[in-house]
């Protein structure tokens, strides 16, 4: 039974990729709706959750946080090279400061 292969036929070939795309879109929207804690998230999590933030910029956010301590205000993200006012405003609803900001 384990060695059997399944073959997609007919409409299944078209439906499976569409279903997968919708599932991925829903997961991305759920992450955006929940937001991301910039004081705890990994670079990969930041890159996934924030618009206009790729892996390199996300790594800069983490490096800045490690070097200078937690972000205490959303606008503190502007101290990171490559993160300007437009990036902050585009993501303001997604950004969370978490527990580290209150320490």
Image: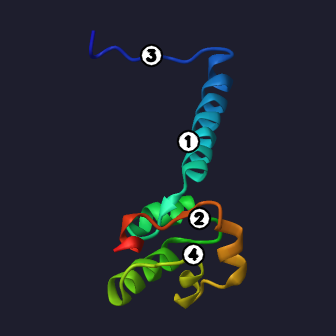
In the rendered structure, the answer to whether residue 5 lies left or right of residue 15 reads left
Name the N-terminal-most of marks 1 and 2: 1
Q: Vertical placement of 9 versus 72: above or below? A: above
Residue under numbered circle 2: 50
In the image, which disc is placed on residue 74?
4
Q: Which residue of the protein is positioned furthest toward the front in this rendering? A: 102
Q: Nearer the viewer, mark 3 or mark 1?
A: 1
Q: Which mark is residue 27?
A: 1
Seen from the viewer's position, the closer of residues 58 and 20 is: 58
Q: Are marks 1 and 4 in contact (CB under 8 Å)?
A: no
Query: Which corner quadrant of the image does residue 79 belong to?
Result: bottom right
Q: Measuring from the top left, give residue 103's x and y in whole percent.
A: 33, 74
Q: Which residue is mark 3?
A: 6
Under circle 3, the secondary element is loop
In the rendered image, which quarter contains the N terminus? top left
Q: Is residue 26 left or right of residue 65?
A: right
Q: Are marks 4 and 3 in contact (CB under 8 Å)?
A: no
């Amino acid at each position: 039974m384990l060695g059997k292969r399944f073959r997609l036929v007919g409409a299944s070939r078209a439906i499976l990729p569409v279903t997968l795309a919708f599932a991925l879109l829903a997961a991305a929207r759920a992450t955006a709706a929940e937001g991301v804690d910039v004081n705890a998230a990994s670079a990969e999590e930041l890159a996934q959750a924030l618009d206009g933030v790729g892996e390199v910029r996300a790594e800069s956010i983490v490096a800045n946080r490690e070097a200078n301590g937690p972000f205490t205000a959303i606008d503190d993200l502007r101290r990171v090279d490559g993160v300007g006012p437009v990036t902050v405003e585009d993501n303001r609803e997604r950004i969370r400061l978490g527990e580290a900001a209150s320490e």
